[in-house]
Image: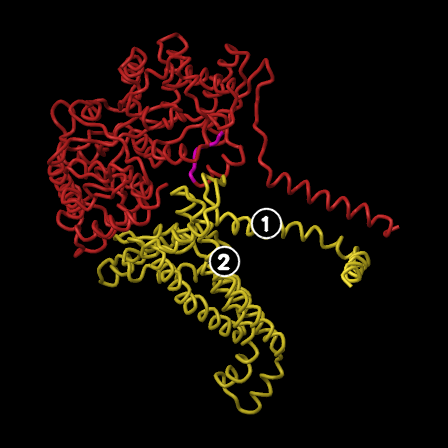
Amino acid sequence: MKRGIFASAVRRLKSDSGAWLLIIPALLCIYFSIIRPQLLAFIWSFCSMKGYTITGFAGLDNFKVVLTDTLFLKTFFNTLKYVMYSAVIGFIPPIIVALIMNELIHFRKIIRVIIYLPSIMPAVAVSLLWYFMYYPDQTGLLNVLIIKLGGNPYTWLQDGRFTILYIVVSMAWSASGATVIYYFSALQGINRELYEAAVMDGAGVLYRLRVVTLPYMSGILLLFFVRHLIGVFNIMEQPMQMTNGGPNNASVTLGLLNYRYAFEDGHPQYALALSVIMFIFGLIATVGYFRLNKKVEENR
Amino acid sequence: MIKSLKKPAVCICILSLLLAEAAGCGKKSEKNNDDGNVTVISVGDIPSADIDPEANKICMKRISDFEKKHPEIKIEPDTYVFSPDTYAAMAEAETLPTTYHLPFTQAKLVIDMEYTADVAGVLKKEGIYEQINDTILEKISKDGKIYLIPESCYDSGIALNMKLFRESDMVNEDGTPKAPTTWEELVETAQKIKEKTGKDGFSMPASGWRFMPVAWSFGGEFLEQTPDGKWKAVFDSPEVTEALQYIKDLKWKYKVLQENALISTDDINQLFASGETAMMFAEPGQVSKCTIYGMELGDVGMIQMPAGPKKHVTLMGGTYSAVRKGASEKEIEAVITWLKETSSLGLVLSDEVKNSIETQTELDLTSKNIVGADMISPWKSDNPVEQYRKQLRQEKANINLNYVKLYNDKSNIEFREEEPVATNALYRTLGDCIQEIWTNENADCAAVLKQAASDFQKNHLDNLK
């Protein structure tokens, strides 16, 4: 019986060898750049290390160190804050902008270019730009405006209660251009006849939005939402550039904590353990993403 | 036709996979660049010809002269500059140059990771071992081995923007600045300058490294080793609390500090260079960086670290040379020969060493590094080489020597080294405390330090192996 299955597998492999040949380059790339590093990271997270050299098996010790770190919970909730703020600031405004763009008759192309411009700026440049806009003395751009309006300079990023919010605003500014274009192209794909029919039935703008636009867009919106959340969960560069996790760890994220373990403290094993923990969260979100994706595809 | 190609193609692909995997996960064999007659060593920190052509030219001439004198050694210039982000990965992949520099702050980490070669044998053979300052020797040794070579050493002090000092009439008749000698005087000086010029009197980043000498001068300590060899965080003491309260008062009570609590050292350099702040914690190397932002060398002043109520103490820093792990004995010898003729490792005042000191001074002048502020010797005593170096640099000084007189006076001050364990994490923890007291006027310094010491003990000291 077993021999039969094996023989059939070999036969299938032989008959599909052409297809296998074609996908081998892609498989190699995926293996070396994604699968192998993840497998090694998983295995090494159970090891004690000196630099990047394994010195023995550590069991769950690395996970214990990471999970009992007094910063872990704070960092985890900080990261969730980024995700939540981003879900509102980074998700809803692009929808509104795309809807407005869809209703525009004139200057559509030039507005599209202007909206996309922030997306072509490197993340580091965006962080620096906003860092100087948020500068807490009279030279910060936002404070210049406040002073012109008769107010007093505000501390912006130094106000630990809202540091994450301000960082998310800078991220949303940078990323929303591309998202707007995606939504806009989805809106362009909606059958115009549906709108014409709704108009003939006397539907106004808001009613058309409710009965035509949103039902058609719900699939892509949901997928973008989940992808957006997964992306923000791994955030590191922006808080590193703008506040380095400060003030007093008010904006530190799991990604930044990971960086500190690996590069500042010389404990890559803890960084790997934290990566595995983050990977599990990411995996849960990804499974949810694929389920949603399947549902969206089925509903089309 | 296609069918006949399938099998060989599949075989080639599988073979490639195996070869690539072997290359990816296998450790490189030890690189020995000596073929019997010529030993090849790569030397890091050589300025790039694209970025600094003048400095590159001087270095290349130095290499060419060295190779003419030592035909058995070939130098490969490398622009590698130490960076903690890439160091471990490069060390593991054995792509570091044979020798490179690294700062004192990273020494413990590098030694613990064992990514540098043991040079004890060659240093002993060359008679260098006995000359190394005891404090430094302790820092670079582990289990009887020596993993780093002292290159240069400095003490932290206060840099003064003399343009603001002159504008505030804060210069003595003999041309020296009316500079603070205690922390109280620093506040008074900063307040006077702020009053007269409207600029910040003093700037500092929320850095634990900068806070350490302040706390020591108030009588505080950070870590303590118990008889069983374990480490204990003791920086929740009244002395360290008093020092932190002083740092807090600079902002909230005396209002002499910059507004930004999250400011980086580089940002402070810009403020200092552009005359937006009058004083900052600095070493000669950091002040040199200010010339990038247009600082006039004639406006540079430096003084010793001010004294605290209990001690007059400062923090030592500096640069080590390292030899790549896996280097052969011949390569280590070649590196030592190179360093003896190009760095402070030349302990006998020969013509070559004189020439090397002159070239280094020329290189510093070309690169607009400040020349004239004295470093401290990493060696046991002030030997003739150090005296010649000091004399030459005073003669060729590109700054006003009166403005650095109080920094060059190294008497009556204690030099201390960094804490020996979890150093970077300690700096970060103290930095967090400073951020807290600078962003929250009502923060209680004692409570902040108590929480920080408890967390540091749990997160770092209890996990030391």
Q: Chain of mark 2?
A: A
Q: Is residue B57 above or below residue B102?
A: above
**Is residue A97 visible to us here?**
yes
Query: Which region of the structure is painted magenta?
Result: B79-84
Q: Which residue is mark 1?
A: A36
Q: Report whether A145 appears left or right of B332.
A: left
Q: Nearer the viewer, residue B294 or A208?
A: A208
> Which chain did the image draw in yellow?
A
What residue is shown at x 60% (from left), y 84% (from top)?
Answer: A194
Q: Main secondary structure of the magenta part?
A: loop
What residue is shown at x 62% (from left), y 74% (from top)?
Answer: A297
Question: Which residue in the rendered view is the most extreme toward the right?
Answer: B1
Q: Residue type at mark 1?
A: Arg
The C terminus of chain B appears in which quarter of the rendering? Answer: top left
Q: Which residue is mark 2?
A: A279
Query: Do badges 1 and 2 share one subunit?
Result: yes
**Is residue A129 visible to us here?**
no
Where residue B155 appears, as percent x and y from the top left, is 26, 28
- Few, some or many residues within 10 Å of mark 1 (<14, 14–19, 20+): some
Tell me which label, 1 or 2, sits earlier in the chain.
1
> Which chain did the image draw in red?
B
Q: Residue type at mark 2?
A: Phe
